[in-house]
Amino acid sequence: MQDSLPLLYSNPHALISIPSLLQYHFLVFILALTAVLGNVISLEAPSLVFWRVSIAGLAMLAWLTVTCPAMLRLSPRRALAVFNVGLLQGAHWVCFFLSVSLSSVSVALAAFATISLFTSISEPLIERRAFRLGELLCGGIVISGILLITGGIDPNHKFGLLVGLAGALLHAIFPVLNRDLAAKGTPPKSMLLYGMGGACLMSAIILPFLSPYHLQAPSRSDWIPLLTLSILCTTIAHTWNIRLLRRLTAYTANLTMNFEPVWGILLGAVIFQEYTELKTSFYLGAILIILANFIDPWLKKARACKL
């Protein structure tokens, strides 16, 4: 399967012999590796994000130059809009990897799973629509989960949890903006390319404010996990995601994506023995948050069926 991954850029029917849902589960597992790889790489969060998005952006630039040069050209106004969304995405990634370094993979991913709470607030405000009872209900469940998690982690990790929650808030905003850009006909690959530029700039802006206050160069041992994070978990994963979304319903995709923090927390527990540092209340809180992420798309599907 690994040899077939590059085909996903140019052939929407690549790997068609493997069911789309099974492919999507594998994609979610790849995305769950992000936190694990970030914990392995020795770079601090701003430098890590800078190198990640630079490599991912250059890979996409090279690919589009060869396969579809037309996607490199956006109107200045549209390019600036995508670039600005990339700034938010870069800030999110810095918060996420900083949360990993300040706490653990499990804590950072538990914070990441609260995106549904912040989306239930940000989406109605941005789109100027009414709040929905089901989304607020899920938000209440998520808040309960956060309270349990706070009591189930090392006190030294609580600031890392707070940073992770800030990253989740940022993540809840930029997909809403991305959806609006996509609805206006912006090619997804162009969005990825210009978005990486914005994320790169944001990481460079943050660099002087966080230790070690300068851009770090990857060590020799960093390059393999860094290239894996940049190429596989960013460029290929996002392109693959776009391809699969053409063959899966939004409900199925969202439900499957909820397994990302599940896989990540399990990987963190197994690889880094994080289960020795976490109390039972942490896992109960994580289960509540993940449960809310399953309830949310189910309620939306039920609501859609009634309309």
Image: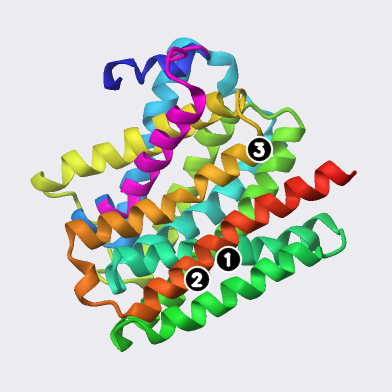
Image disc number at residue 165: 2
Q: Which label sits on residue 250?
A: 3
Under tag 3, what secondary structure? helix
Q: Residue at x 43, y 48 (%)?
A: 200
Q: How many marks?
A: 3
Residue 175 horizontal/vertical position (percent): 63, 48
CA neighbours of label 3 inside 10 A, class few (<14), some (14 to 19), many (20+) = few
The answer to whether mark 2 and mark 1 are in CB contact below 8 A is: yes
Q: Relative to 261, is 98 above or below?
A: below
Q: At numbered mark 1, what does the secondary structure look like: helix, strand or loop?
A: helix
The kind of residue on which mark 2 rests is: Leu
Q: Main secondary structure of the magenta part?
A: helix
Q: Which residues are drawn in magenta?
A: 13-36
Q: CA distance from mark 2 to mark 1?
A: 6 Å
Instruction: Please tell me which of labels 1 and 3 falls first in the chain.
Output: 1
Query: As drawn, is 116 to the left or to the right of 283?
Result: right
Q: Is residue 73 found left or right of 113 in the rendered image?
A: right
Q: Camera-side residue: 161 or 51?
A: 161
Residue 88 in picture, x, y percent from top left? 56, 56
Looking at the image, is mark 1 or mark 3 nearer the viewer? 3
Nearer the viewer's eye, disc 2 or disc 3?
3
Residue 27 is one of the magenta-drawn residues: yes
